[in-house]
Structure formats: C-alpha cells, structure tokens
C-alpha cells in the first residue's frame, strides 16, 4: 500500500499539479486518487474533528443496498427466459444466462455515464462527485434485460447531461437522474419499453422489437406472454386472472410470486423481498429516508383500498390493494428512487407528504390510465418537480409561526 | 396558614421550565480531565487579544514600557468607548502587536510575581441603579464577559435585554465539569448573579443529570430551568430557544458560568481578579487535569512536557467544535474554559470508504462502530472526506434541537437574502449552535463560518 501511495504521490501527482503537463486532467487524477485512498485532508477552520462519513461512504451504502435486487434480477432474467422456452434450468444456468445479459448493460451504463461526468469535470474544473456511482447502477436495474446496448448508452448520456450536468452537477439536479434515463427511453423508444419485452429472448426471434409469430410457434411455450403482471391487468381482456410467462394461471400464487420476484419485469424491480432487504440496509444505516419509503407504500396501499371500495365490476380497480405494493416498480421506486435526497423533498414533514403523493399518484396512473401501466416512474418524476413546492409550504408554516410569535411579543409589551 | 408557606410568586420565580431535547449528539472522545486542580507555575507573560472579541474595533490605551496593574484598561471599543478591556495582571507592557491597517492584534504583558490590583470603587448593590452597575462593569473590564444574542458579540450596554441566560453546564466534547470548576466559588457566583439580576431577569439552566451542585440548583435571584438531552443541550442558544425565544428586535444576554464568578469577585473583593479553572483535555495530553489560571495564560504553562510528541498534534484553545487553533507558543482565549490537544490527521487510508469501520466514530450507522455505543474514540483532525455540494438531507436536523430549518437558513445566508434570514430565525442562532451540523456534515460544509457571515451581514445592515 505504502509503495502504491509513494508512487502516486511522487511519480504521478506532479504531472497533474499546477504547471504539470497533464494539469487539465487533475479532476480525473484526484477522482481516482481519492477513490483509492480516503484523502488525508485536515480541518482548517471551524470544527477540528469531523464525522467519519463522506459522500463516498454514503453512496457505497446505497450500492450495497442494491446488491440483493441486482443478484436476484440477474437470476430472474435467466429464470424467465427458460420458463418461456419451457426448459428446465438450474440456478447456475439461469444465473449465468442473466449475467451475460445484465453485465454488459451495467458496464455500458457506467462507462458512458462516468466518461461524460469526467469530461464535464475536466471542462468545469471541479472535483468528480460520487453521484453517478449510484445512478450508474440504478439505470440497468430499471431497464428490460433485452434492451439494446446503444440505447443504454444513449439514455445514460442523456441522463447525465440533461438530467444533471446542465443544472450544475451532483446535488443540483431537479429530477432523479436514473429516472430521466428511463423516461427518455420510455418516450423515445416505446416499443422497447412496454408490451411483450419483459422476458429476455434471443435476438433473432424478434423483428423490430416485437417477437415474431414464427418465433412464438417455433420455440416458445404455448400461450407465451412477455408482458408484466401490470401489463396484463391494464389489458382490455383482463378477467381477474394472472398468467406467468408460460401462460399458466398463477392467480392463486400471484402475491407470493410477485413478492419473491418470479415475475417478468425490469431487471431489478421484480423481487419485493430483495428490495426490502435493501430498504432495511438503507434505513438502518440512515442513508435512505424511512419517512419516504414508508409513506410511499402507505400512499399506494390507501389508494388501492379506495379503488377497491368503488370498484364495482371494474376488475382492475378490484385488484387487492396489497397487490399494488408488490407489482411493478412500486417497491423499487419507493426504496431506491423516491429516496434520492437531491430530488426528494428535504424537510421531514415534506418527505411524508412527498411519499404519500408518489404512492397515491402511482396507483392512480396504473389503474386509471391503461396506456401507462407503470405509473411509478411518472409519479416520482412528477413529485420530484413538486418537492420544492411542498418544502416551500412546510418552511413557510415555520416562518409564519415565527411571525405570529413576534406579533404576540410586541402586543404583550405595548 | 403555616409559617413557612411560600407565596405563589416566589415559587414561580424559582421553578423554571423543564426542557427535554432528543436531537443532538455527544461526541465520545478519549481524554477527559481528571478532577484534580493544579496551579501551574511559569506564567510570566500574559497576552490579551482583541481578536477574541468578534467585530470589535479596539483603540489601544497603552504603549510598550507602560506599567499596568490588574484592572488597568489596555484598550476600549471604538463604537462603545465606555466598554474597556483591562489587564488581568500587573506588570510591564512588553509588546503591542498590530496587523494589517495597524489593526491591534494583541498586547503582551510581563507579569509581576505578586499581582498588584487596581482598587475598584463598587456601588452598593442595594442602592445602585442599573446605570451605575453597567458603568462599573464597563469601566473595570468586565463588560466583555457579557455577550448578546442576536449576533453573538459583546453586549451593547445601551440596549436593555429581555433576560440574562447562563448555562450551568458545558456539553461540548471533553468539556470541563462546571460543578467542579466552581467548587469553592459559590459565594462569588451568587454575588455575580445578584449583580446581573439588577440588570435583567436571570435564567440559569441546569442539566437534569449532570448538574448536581447547589451553586446552580439553589442559586437565588434567578429562575432555574432544567434541560435533559445530549449536546448541544449546554449551548445557551438552545436553552434560550426553549425558554423564551428571541424575536426580531429583542436582545438576550449570555454569560459563562465561570465569568459570573469573576463579575461577582469585583463586588466581593473589589478588584478585577480574572482567575478561572481550565480543563486540560484531549487524547494527546499526558496529565489531564484542571488548572487554576488567569485569562490570557500562555499554553506552554499548561502543556510544556505534558503532550505526546511522537506525532504532530493540534493544540486548541477551547473545545474541538468551537475552539481556536493555537500553537505551543499561543495563549488561552478570553472566553475559553478548556484546552484540547488531539492528533493531526494521519496518513490517507486505502479504500477507507468501504472498510467496515469498527473504530470510526460517526453519527450515521454506516460504520460498524454503532455496535459499540459507549466506546470512546481518539479523533484526529482529518476531514474524513472532501467538500461537496449539499446532497444528504435531514442530517443537520438530527443534531439541531431548535424549531428552525438549518439548511434553509444556511442557503438564505449563502444567497445573501436578508429578509429570508430574518424569517428563518437567524436572530436566535450563533455559530456554535451549528458546530454539530458541521461535524456530522457528509458534504464537509463549513456551516459555522456561513452562519458567522450571515450574522455579520445583518449586524452591518441593522446598524
């Protein structure tokens, strides 16, 4: 370690310092150096000691929290694939298939996103911030496994530039960076982001991005459906029953299937259990806001209940309220997206309102607008925009209390 | 009616509020002082630094070579010429240091072996008017011990406060035990309270567990409040916020408990006797004790041959949160009750941000050290990271027990939005109230400096 440290300090660093020939690339060097070694900077003024935490630590905690969802997502990608083919596959086989699908997406997401981030740091001469470490992992987890890699690259580039850097970088963005990437793909390439795309198939069986009839007849099981469970409920033919990829009726076990994650969907979103493990890590370490996580689930559940009450013979409205918590991206959004501190509400009361709002709106969009069975993304983006307004009113009420106190005090003395 | 019946008003006078705060953080450090008091020798010079008084424009009254007694004015405030600053010892002025634009930086006095005191004429407390007491305190160098909120500067003697607030304990890391520091000084402390009570209602806030001394709990002429909770429960600003918050246009005065005794001494001994008990603390001090010293004492007298010399250390006059960085040749700050010596930041740490962190203190639970909630740590001066934009939210709120939104206030200050600063409660806060925010900050933002800047802006604006 000492040798590496010496090499960096004595041999490398002078090149990047003021006057060195590579000085332009100082932010890049600094980024890597501080990644390897927590820097030895000391306090100068103000407090003389500091808490051990820094942004790298915080961001690593979020990544650790995502690992269960990632691992399960990799496995499930393979599992759904083999299920659709009607083949038996063990854990290892399914996992390897998934890994081959998912790993390139992660690599492309990080390479493109970090590359652009480095570029901005060099141009704007500021230190590399840790924000993209999390965004770079979130983006793959909210995409279908078969997404073409050039789209991942395009989305990551769009998210970093338009979602973050034009506002001034990490800490300054208005919308969640990863959701910007997903929203971009959702609206730019809708056929790749909705419908039958959620089960990973071999490329040759697709034309455009629709699975060809020939392929269905050729390799897939009878009654194959590649849509998510939410996609099925939004379908006009929905009769209150759920089917798995192989077209089998899973209505009786749909809640547990969805809870454990054996359903089609974005790579990281399917297993509510894996996501809850992540939520546990975030809440225990204090990195994620429990107020947002709990209030988002609560909002969704209450909205589901409300729909149940007024459902009548509308079968989608009658989907039990607790199903909404395990279907689609609600859990993933509540735990990993809504809690992004930069784009969420900042006051404690604001966080509760923000979470409730996301939960309610997500279920509202799901049920009322069948064109968007996945309302979570839109709900979070909408409340990202609304968060400053919510905070404004919370802070304003604090200000009003102070004004009232002043009035009371001046009346008392006069 | 029984003889010892206390009239209702009398009880109300003594029964203050009982406050409970949950937000805050006790930083658990190695290096508390043992409860033994020593009187250091080798105190041959004393330095008084006008820079200890924020925003003061001093006018010097002495020249090198002048003989002074303890109590002789050394300089005064240009804005309030009645406010004088006096020598705490007798001897010869040996150095008057000036900085940029001839600004007075410090005055050094070669101290006599036996201190000769200037005789002080003090009015009788029974008959004295407010004005007489104020002018006695100003004239004899004691006014500097009275600070005011808003702005956290020496009080303006011409504006009457709504109350005088005294904290009976210090909750800062490794802080001195004020019960112990004031042991034997009870009568002087009470006299100080009697003096202050002539000026405005006096409020003393004691900790429900830490404060045991009757010097505080049975103090007369004051309302005794109690508070329970972690640091910053001992910060007088937090106490005022919960007892009687400061509105725009209002003023509260604050005095450190030991300084109350110095004020009392002027009236009992009829001399300016600025003696106080200072805790010598920190992991790098070998013999951690309490020392009976005078304001402006050289740190050498406390630390010579008493600190660990195997690696670089930081010497702080005050505590690790609000103290001033000094060197071995430095001097004790005017208001400081404590000296702390801690290690300077060590070597960079390989992949430090991903290690489990059993030995790293943090408010967050991102290090496994949260599994050992009573362990004490040797903290060094490492920043433990790099400065970033505000990212994490809700962090400051966990250590900020006031009904104020700290981040919004800081942002209003950074935007120089005076109206917003006022609305968000800047009159109630002092930099020290943000020290814990600065400590826990993930983005390593210097919140105390920002608050100071905001207070300065407002002070200039309201003048």
Image (tube, grey):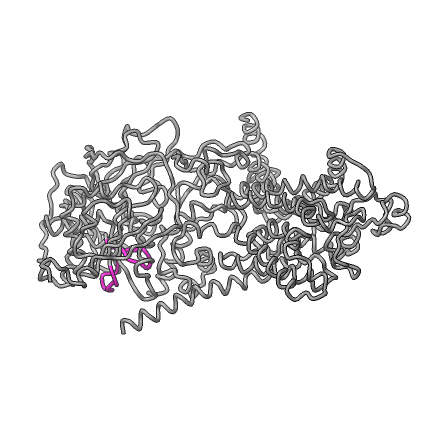
Residue B441 location (% of width, % of height)? 46, 47
Q: Please tell me whether the stretch drawn in magenta is mainly helix, strand or loop.
A: loop
How many callouts does the rendering have? 0
Estimate the x, y position of residue A192 in percent, counting from the top left: 78, 52
Residue A387 lies left or right of residue B456; in this view the side is right
Q: Taking B295 as reference, is B32 left or right? A: right
Q: Nearer the viewer, residue A29 or B105?
A: A29
Is residue B261 rendered magenta in the image?
Answer: no
Quadrant of residue A397 within the rendered picture: bottom left
Q: Position of residue A13 (x, y in %)?
A: 56, 34
Locate residue B212: give its quadrant: top left
Across and down, in percent, residue B461 comes to 37, 64
Q: Please indicate, yes or no, whether residue A291 appears anywhere in the rendered image.
A: yes
Which residue appears at 80% of the width and 40% of the height?
Answer: A82
- Please report the bounds of the magenta region as a residue range: B146-163
Residue nearest the viewer, comparing B362 with B418? B362
Report which quarter residue A16 is drawn in.
top right
Task: Please identify the quadrant where the C terminus of chain A is shown.
Answer: bottom left
Compared with A168, A369 (above or below) is below
């Amino acid at each position: 370690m000492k040798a590496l440290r010496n090499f960096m300090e004595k041999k490398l660093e002078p090149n990047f310092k003021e006057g060195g020939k590579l000085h332009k690339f100082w932010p890049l060097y600094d980024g890597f150096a501080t990644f390897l070694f927590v820097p030895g900077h000391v306090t100068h003024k103000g407090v003389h000691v500091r808490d051990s935490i820094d942004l790298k630590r915080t961001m690593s905690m979020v990544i650790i929290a995502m690992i269960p969802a990632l691992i399960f997502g990799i496995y499930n990608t393979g599992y759904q694939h083999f299920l659709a083919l009607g083949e038996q596959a063990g854990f290892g086989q399914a996992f390897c298939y998934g890994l081959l699908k998912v790993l390139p997406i992660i690599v492309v997401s990080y390479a493109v996103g970090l590359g652009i981030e480095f570029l901005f740091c060099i141009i704007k001469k500021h230190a590399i911030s840790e924000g993209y470490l999390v965004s770079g992992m979130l983006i793959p987890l909210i995409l279908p496994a078969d997404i073409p890699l050039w789209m991942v690259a395009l989305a990551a580039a769009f998210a970093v530039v338009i979602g973050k850097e034009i506002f001034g970088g990490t800490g300054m963005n208005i919308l969640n960076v990863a959701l910007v990437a997903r929203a971009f793909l959702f609206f730019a390439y809708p056929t790749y982001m909705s419908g039958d795309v959620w089960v990973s198939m071999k490329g040759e069986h697709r034309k455009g991005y629709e699975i060809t009839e020939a392929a269905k007849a050729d390799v897939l099981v009878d009654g194959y459906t590649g849509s998510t469970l939410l996609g099925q409920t939004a379908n006009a033919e929905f009769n209150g029953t759920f089917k798995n990829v192989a077209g089998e009726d899973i209505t009786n076990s749909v809640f547990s299937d969805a809870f454990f994650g054996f359903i089609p969907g974005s790579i990281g979103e399917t297993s509510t259990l894996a996501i809850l493990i992540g939520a546990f890590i975030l809440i225990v370490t204090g990195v994620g806001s429990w107020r947002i996580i709990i209030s988002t689930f609560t909002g969704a559940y209450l909205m589901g209940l409300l729909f149940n009450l007024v459902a009548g013979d509308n079968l989608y409205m009658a989907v039990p309220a607790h199903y909404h918590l395990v279907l689609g991206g609600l859990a993933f959004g509540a735990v990993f997206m809504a809690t992004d501190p930069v784009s969420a509400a900042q006051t404690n009361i604001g966080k509760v309102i923000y979470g409730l709002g996301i939960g309610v709106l997500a279920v509202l969009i799901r049920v009322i607008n069948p064109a968007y069975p996945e309302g979570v993304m839109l709900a979070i983006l909408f409340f990202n925009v609304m968060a400053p307004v919510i905070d404004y009113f919370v802070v304003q009420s604090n200000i009003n209390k102070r004004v009232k106190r002043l009035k009371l005090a001046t009346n008392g003395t006069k | 009616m029984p003889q010892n019946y206390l009239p209702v008003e009398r009880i109300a006078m003594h029964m203050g509020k009982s406050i409970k705060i949950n937000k805050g953080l006790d930083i658990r450090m190695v290096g508390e002082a043992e409860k033994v008091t020593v009187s250091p020798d080798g105190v041959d010079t004393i330095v008084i630094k006008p820079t200890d008084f924020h925003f003061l424009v001093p006018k010097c009254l002495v020249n090198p070579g002048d003989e002074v007694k303890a109590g002789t004015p050394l300089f005064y405030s240009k804005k309030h010429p009645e406010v004088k600053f006096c020598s705490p010892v007798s001897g010869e002025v040996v150095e008057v240091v000036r900085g940029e634009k001839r600004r007075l930086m410090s005055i050094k006095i070669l101290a006599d072996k036996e201190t000769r005191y200037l005789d002080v004429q003090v009015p009788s407390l029974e008959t004295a008017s407010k004005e007489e007491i104020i002018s006695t305190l100003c004239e004899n160098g004691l006014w500097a011990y009275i600070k005011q909120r808003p702005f956290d500067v020496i009080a303006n003697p011409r504006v009457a406060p709504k109350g005088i607030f005294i904290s009976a304990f210090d909750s800062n890391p490794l802080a001195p035990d004020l019960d112990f520091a004031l042991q034997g000084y009870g009568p002087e402390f009470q006299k100080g309270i009697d003096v202050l009570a002539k000026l405005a209602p006096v409020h003393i806030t004691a900790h429900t567990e830490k404060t045991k001394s009757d010097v505080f709990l049975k103090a007369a002429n004051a309302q005794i409040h109690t508070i329970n909770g972690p640091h910053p429960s001992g910060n007088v600003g937090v106490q005022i916020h919960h007892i009687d918050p400061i509105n725009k246009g209002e003023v509260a005065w604050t005095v450190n408990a030991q300084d109350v005794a110095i004020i009392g001494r002027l009236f009992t001994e009829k001399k300016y006797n600025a003696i106080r008990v200072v805790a010598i603390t920190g992991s790098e001090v070998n013999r951690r004790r309490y020392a009976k010293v005078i304001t402006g004492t050289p740190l050498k007298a406390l630390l010579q041959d008493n600190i660990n010399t195997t690696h670089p250390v930081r010497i702080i006059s005050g505590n690790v949160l609000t103290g001033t960085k000094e060197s071995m040749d430095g001097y004790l700050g005017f208001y400081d009750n404590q000296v702390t010596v801690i290690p300077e930041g060590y070597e960079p740490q390989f992949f430090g941000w991903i290690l489990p962190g059993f030995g790293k203190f943090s408010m967050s639970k991102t290090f496994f050290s949260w599994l050992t909630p009573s362990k004490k740590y040797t903290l060094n001066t490492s920043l433990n990271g790099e400065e970033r934009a505000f990212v994490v939210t809700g962090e400051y709120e966990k250590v900020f027990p006031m009904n104020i939104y700290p981040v919004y206030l800081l942002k209003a200050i950074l935007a120089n939005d005076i109206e917003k600063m006022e609305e968000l409660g800047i009159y109630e806060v002092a930099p020290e109230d943000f020290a814990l925010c600065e400590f826990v900050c993930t983005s390593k933002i210097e919140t105390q400096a920002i608050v100071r800047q905001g207070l300065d802006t407002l002070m200039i604006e309201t003048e």
